[in-house]
Amino acid sequence: MTDLTQDVVRELLTGFVDPNHGENLVACGSVRGVGVDGANVAVEIALGYPAENWADTLAAQVQAFLEADPRIDRAVVDVSWHVIAHKVQQGLTPLPEIKNIIAVASGKGGVGKSTTAVNLALALQAEGATVGILDADIYGPSQPRMLGISGKPDTRDGKVIVPKQAHGLQVMSIGFMIEEDTPMIWRGPMVTQALQQLLNETDWQGLDYLVIDLPPGTGDIQLTLCQRVPVSGAVIVTTPQDIALLDARKGLKMFEKVAVPVLGIVENMSTHVCSNCGHEEPIFGSGGGASMAAQYGVPLLGRLPLDIRIREEVDSGNPTVISAPDSAIAATYREIARKVAGQLSRQARNKSIGFPNIVIQNT
């Protein structure tokens, strides 16, 4: 029998795949330390994504995995996590106070993109991250209603806007500046300028993630925004319906053109379960999100049902992750959030962060 060493334990850990990003713990650099004392081992794991409610589960899984080896009597596993800033498009630099921007997009409207975006933001926060959400849908802002907040935001000096607070999130939307029934009759350049002002002139505070709820579609406005906003990764929301998938593919291709990694696909309205009889039926078709994910080599982050409670909860200003945290739907949102952040943790680190500019002057 091979003597138990640190190298042997590390080799064993190459067989444990983190379900949130699909790589083994060694390959992704999560194993920070290994100690061996006879038949007892201690392992230190550091994740690159928030895992407040997942760390204990992962520790127990890794412990059971190691103790299944006959050479190991006892394994002690410690799991921690830390979020860093990841690489953005070439020529752009992450914004101060925002480590990572995650764009949530759809090829067309009506697929539940905004509902997914707000629950994703709240689920990331539930896992321990500091999160903000920017409602970039200038023509149809919906986040104020979904988060139950209204009124104009404050400003400290007349230049910088203080973000609104809702359920612990830092929130900004054009909807705070106009009446709810006022149409935005603006051309593309005005929309682009307005979004950049909302992004750059808001006093964001120490965000691990800023979730941007992008306008639906793949036109000039969306492309321009993706070229000017330093995005770390994107999430595509679609339904299984063929028409929605056609447009979702265009959204994915748009991010490819601007060199923004697509972190995965969320299939919304995947199936409907009758609240009276329990009959389940795929109203919009089935398997569309999975086939699209396989076609483009990106993860299927999760499937969400067509459920009246999701709609009722966002309409009331209390999205599912907040109003029903113990529900199966909220658990799915949290799983999607961990996978989004887990996929992002595999991306290259932004090396421009933390290195000061060196200026040489004659004195």
Image (cartoon, rainbow, N blue to C red):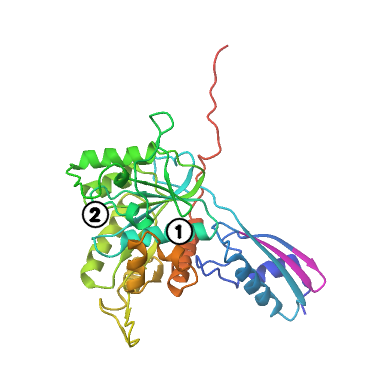
Horizontal and vertical percent for residue 107?
A: 25, 60
Query: In this orientation, which residue lies closer to the viewer: 231 or 327?
Result: 327
Q: Quadrant of residue 163?
A: top left
Residue 42 is covered by the magenta coloring: yes
276 in relation to 44, above or below:
below
Location of residue 104 in the rendering, given as x and y in whole percent from the top left corner: 35, 56
Q: Where is residue 88 in the image (x, y as percent from the top left)?
A: 42, 46
Estimate the x, y position of residue 74 in percent, counting from the top left.
76, 74
Q: Residues within 10 Å of mark 1 (few under 14, many from 20)?
A: many
Task: Please provide the residue range marked out in magenta.
Answer: 35-46
Q: Residue 218 carries which label?
A: 2
Taking the image as shown, residue 76 lies to the left or right of residue 210, namely right
Q: Which of 54 and 156 is in front in this view?
A: 156
Q: Which comes sooner in the sequence, label 2 or label 1?
A: 1
Residue under numbered circle 1: 122
Element carrying mark 1: helix
Alpha carbon distance from label 2 to label 1: 26 Å
40 left or right of 48? right
Q: Nearer the viewer, residue 360 or 285?
A: 285
Q: Nearer the viewer, mark 2 or mark 1?
A: 1
Q: Is residue 150 above or below residue 345?
A: above
Q: Which residue is drawn at 49% across and 51% down?
A: 348
Q: Tell me whether circle 2 and circle 1 mark residues in contact (CB < 8 Å).
A: no
In the displayed structure, 29 sits above or below 196; it is: below
